[in-house]
Image (tube, rainbow, N blue to C red):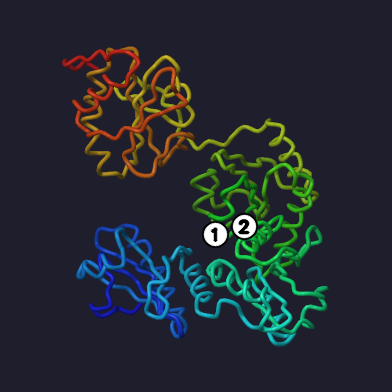
Amino acid sequence: PLTLPLPLMLQAATMSYLFGPDIIRWPTHRETEWCGHCKKLAPDFETAATRLKGTVPLAKVDCTASPDTCGRFGVTGYPTLKIFRNGEDASSYDGPRSADGIVHFMKKQAGPNSVTLRREADLEAFVNHFDASVVGFFSGPDSGQLAEFLKAASVMREHFRFAHTIDMTLGLKHGVDTERVLLFRPPRLSSKFEESVLRFTETITTHTLRRFIRDNIFGMCPHLTNENRDKLKGQDLLTAYYDLDYLQNPKGTNYWRNRVMKVGSQFASQGLSFAVANRKDFVDELEEEFGLGASDGGDLPFVTIRTQQGFKYTMREEFTRDGKSLERFLEDYFAGRLKRYIKSEPIPEKNKGPVKVVVAESFEEIVNEPEKDVLIEFYAPWCGHCKSLEPKYKELAEQLYSDPNIVIAKMDATANDVPQGFDVQGFPTIYFAQAGKKDQPKRYEGAHEVKDFIKYLKRESSHVPVVSRVKEDL
């Protein structure tokens, strides 16, 4: 990345700027000695800058040295990334933060909103791409629908690929006989189970075209990547992870994808989406979320389901080539016969201390015990704030140890799945689950002194707390 002179700096930790050949972009990347997110982004940003050299310059700025400039552009957090066009703040950068993702995203930004196609070879080259393509065929440069198409492309160019032509003959082989927009799915994902080219039949507006693309771009079984994962994971999703490689082994890759699609087509109307993914791209996630080791599963696909509510399921039966095992797995899933996969530490054999140790497998028994009020801390072993809280939290538990109606508990949120209803984004996070209201846990927002916890519990508990100032001999 380029280091900009102070007059051009955005300020507040380091911000990175991107410059295009005819557009100026500045993703602001504020990195400081204390900003962990900035440090995590830095190597990917450096790699992306090298790969984009000569196409889209990336730059970084030390914003701590010039707070006034940073304030002028509304920078308040770290790292902030912004895109500038023609020297003006055009938009916040909301694309991927991996090197591949930044390169891919910013290459889209460097060209026109919609590529002009003049020959059939242009069309073939444009749609023969890793990503889906949206192409408009129009009768002439004065077409009202062309104007609407270009307007929509300018709004959605950051997320989708657009091209257009005013030579209607280019669309003849695709059945285009009037002004029309076609959505071309990536050739590598072509399958007999679904159409590869879809026709948009409504009047073109940004709203109608956006809805059409959103509803159709991924198809029945898309390729899940680190770049599109957030868009795909907002739904009930079955994913088959295996040695997916469309560059070196497209035939073998689609062999397993076709098995997923064949079985999935039988359940298409039941609200479950499907995807395939390169297992190597998600090794850490599979280990962290599903307990899958690097050598587990062999060469066969490993299948998971993750619902919008965060429930997780894994297919334990070996994936058979006839697809029957996947079919049985889905039948059990829709019949409610599957046991949810829960990441959990072992239940402690002894748990007699003042602070009760909770794991995912014992959460229901301890925290959701209907007759008891429970204050639970979600912590991380490496968290300095958690370590500072520990002696105070233990003293609180000791003072309330003789009260049979109150439980002071803690759970390692890095080693156990956190149940729905408990939003844990940082550490420590503390919740209070009142007796009789276990479906309405309250987040504790007060100070972390013993007296503050006592005051809170006296106000919120279903029973008046029994507080002992004398520590029990435990």
Task: Measure the C-alpha gap from mark 2 to mark 1.
Answer: 8 Å
Q: Is residue 252 left or right of residue 48?
A: right
Question: Where does the image place residue 215, in percent across and percent down from the top left?
Answer: 66, 56
Give the side of residue 207 with respect to residue 396, left or right: right
Query: How far from the left and from the top, in percent, is residue 309?
Result: 55, 39
Amino acid beneath label 1: Asp
Q: Position of residue 151 (x, y in %)?
A: 58, 72
* Amino acid type, label 2: Ala
Kindly indicate whether the residue at mark 1 contacts the one at mark 2 (C-beta within 8 angstroms): yes
Q: State the residue at coordinates (20%, 14%).
A: 468
Q: Which mark is residue 281?
A: 1
Mark 2 closeness class: few <14, some 14–19, many ≥20 residues within 10 Å = many
Q: Pick the quarter of the image with the N terminus.
A: bottom left
Residue located beneath label 2 in the image: 277
Q: Which mark is residue 387?
A: none
At a point 61% along the width and 61% down the height, the residue shown is 207
Is the C terminus in the top left, top right, bottom left or bottom right quadrant?
top left
SS class of the residue under badge 2? strand
Q: Residue at x 27, y 16 (%)?
A: 401
Mark 1: few/some/many CA within 10 Å (<14, 14-19, 20+): some
Residue 391 percent location from the top left of the image = 21, 31
Q: Is residue 391 above or below residue 264?
A: above
Viewer-nearest residue: 424 or 157: 157
- Identify the element where label 1 is drawn: helix
Left or right: 402 in relation to 260: left
